Image (cartoon, rainbow, N blue to C red):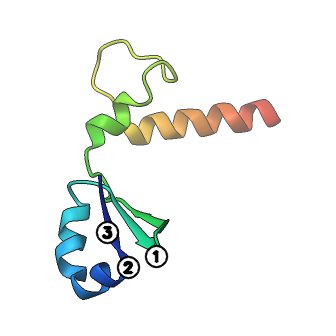
Amino acid sequence: MIQITATDFKANFGKYLKQAEREDIVITKSGKSVVKLSGIKQDKVKDIESLFGIIPWDGEDIDIKQLKAERLAKKYESLA
């Protein structure tokens, strides 16, 4: 994580935009942290790994759409 001033961020927007894809950037104003800029991670494997323990998994391939449909069905089944 790096820390930069708002003035530096405005002057080098493109540079920091690319850098935010790789690491978090904290932008300061008058010496105080005001914003944290983070890139969006496109790694679906990490997203799925974050669900371990929440979704039962038997070792087979995971179909995200199917899991969502099953969760919604259970949710609305319990409301009926």
At a point 37% along the width and 12% down the height, the residue shown is 58
For mark 1, does the 10 Å Cα neighbourhood hold few (<14), some (14 to 19), or many (20 or more) residues?
A: few
- The reply to whether the C-beta atoms of the residues labelled 1 and 2 are less than 8 Å apart is yes
Of residues 33 and 16, the one nearer the viewer is 33
Residue 75, which numbered label? none
Q: Amino acid at mark 1?
A: Lys
At a point 35% along the width and 59% down the height, the residue shown is 38
Q: Circle 2 sits on which residue?
A: 6
Q: Identify the secondary structure beneath mark 1.
A: strand
Residue 29, which numbered label? 1
Left or right relative to 53: residue 72: right
Of residues 38 and 29, the one nearer the viewer is 29
* Quarter occupied by the C terminus: top right
Residue 61 location (% of width, % of height) = 27, 25
Mark 3 / mark 1, whichever is N-terminal: 3
Left or right relative to 61: residue 71: right
Determine if residue 80 is in view: no
Of residues 15 and 63, the one nearer the viewer is 15
Q: Circle 3 sits on which residue?
A: 4
Residue 35 location (% of width, % of height) = 46, 67
Alpha-carbon span between mark 1 and mark 2: 6 Å
Residue 66 location (% of width, % of height) = 43, 36
The answer to whether residue 25 is above or below residue 50 is: below
Q: Amino acid at mark 2?
A: Ala
Residue with the most extreme bottom position: 11
At a point 29% along the width and 52% down the height, the residue shown is 1
Residue 46 location (% of width, % of height) = 30, 36
The answer to whether residue 65 is above or below residue 31 is: above
Mark 1 / mark 2, whichever is N-terminal: 2
Residue with the most extreme front position: 31
